Image (cartoon, rainbow, N blue to C red):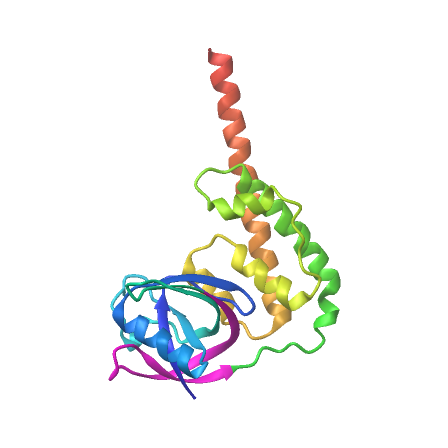
Amino acid sequence: MNLPLFPLQTVLFPGMPIHLHIFEKRYRLMIQRCLQKDLTFGVVLLRKGHENEKEDHTYSIGCTAKIVDIETLKDGRFYLTALGESRFRIHSIDTRIPYMMGNIEELLTDYNHSHLLLPETNILRRHIRTYLELLSATDGYQYELKELSNTNLHLPEEPIFLIHLAASLLQLPSNEKQNLLSISNLFELNSQIQRIFRREISIMKSLAEMDREAVNRSMWQN
């Protein structure tokens, strides 16, 4: 199967949205062709330090993206929203056209018995809420994530969607998110995500405690 590829410095997970500003001529052409033929495109992560888009400069596992909303500007640029659909593996890349075209195979995630994850996802929901609450008190993080923590956030009941949402919300280096995208077993993915949440929550709590101690020392000295 051939798929147009969009190398980016982000990781897309199934079921998650991505918002893109398409301004380069080659990718405007790619999006036009996707719209004309009702095609998906593939989002793949560029390797760190390799902004030049060559076959060995991207990771081999990516996620297909379906365009769900698009705004065309007068100068030919696009603002679009796409939704992640399914994971894939790149076998080879054709660079004879202006943008990258990959020969890919779809990677099937083992969703069997996902209902057995319901007790685990209750724990995951608590991790997500705690994580977002801690982020809301931290400078330098995305405004959208802070807004999530300040609202009555409704987290999905469906385990598959919740797990992919959790992976998407984590503020991690892209290569670490790529490792999560590469996991095919949903039980293993959930286990890895919960491990990372526990690690990140512990770190943020420790940093917050250090900040409080520093403030208390400053007040005492004054």
User: For residue 124, which quarter of the picture?
Assistant: bottom right
Q: Is residue 133 above or below residue 191?
A: above
Of helix, strand and loop, which mostly describes the magenta segment?
A: strand
Q: On the picture, is 178 further left or further right than 165?
A: left
Taking the spot 62% from the left edge, 51% from the top edge, the residue there is 128
In the image, farthest residue toward the front:
74
User: For residue 7, which quarter of the picture?
Assistant: bottom left
Q: On the picture, is 40 further left or further right than 5?
A: right
Q: Is residue 119 above or below residue 221?
A: below
**Depth check, front residue: 146 or 112:** 146
**Depth check, front residue: 15 or 177:** 15
Residue 184, position in %: x, y?
Answer: 56, 75
Residue 137, position in %: x, y?
Answer: 54, 36
Taking the spot 45% from the left edge, 78% from the top edge, the residue there is 40
Based on the picture, tell me whether residue 95 belongs to the magenta stretch.
yes
Numbered-mark total:
0
In the image, farthest residue toward the top:
222
User: For residue 134, which quarter of the picture?
Assistant: top right
Q: On the picture, is 210 further left or further right than 175?
A: right
Residue 145, position in %: x, y?
Answer: 53, 48
Taking the spot 67% from the left edge, 46% from the top edge, the residue there is 152
Q: Quadrant of the N terminus?
A: bottom left
Q: Is residue 90 above or below residue 159?
A: below
Q: On the picture, is 123 further left or further right than 140?
A: right
Magenta-highlighted residues: 81-106
In the image, farthest residue toward the bottom:
1
Based on the picture, tell me whether residue 65 belongs to the magenta stretch.
no
Taking the spot 46% from the left edge, 37% from the top edge, the residue there is 139
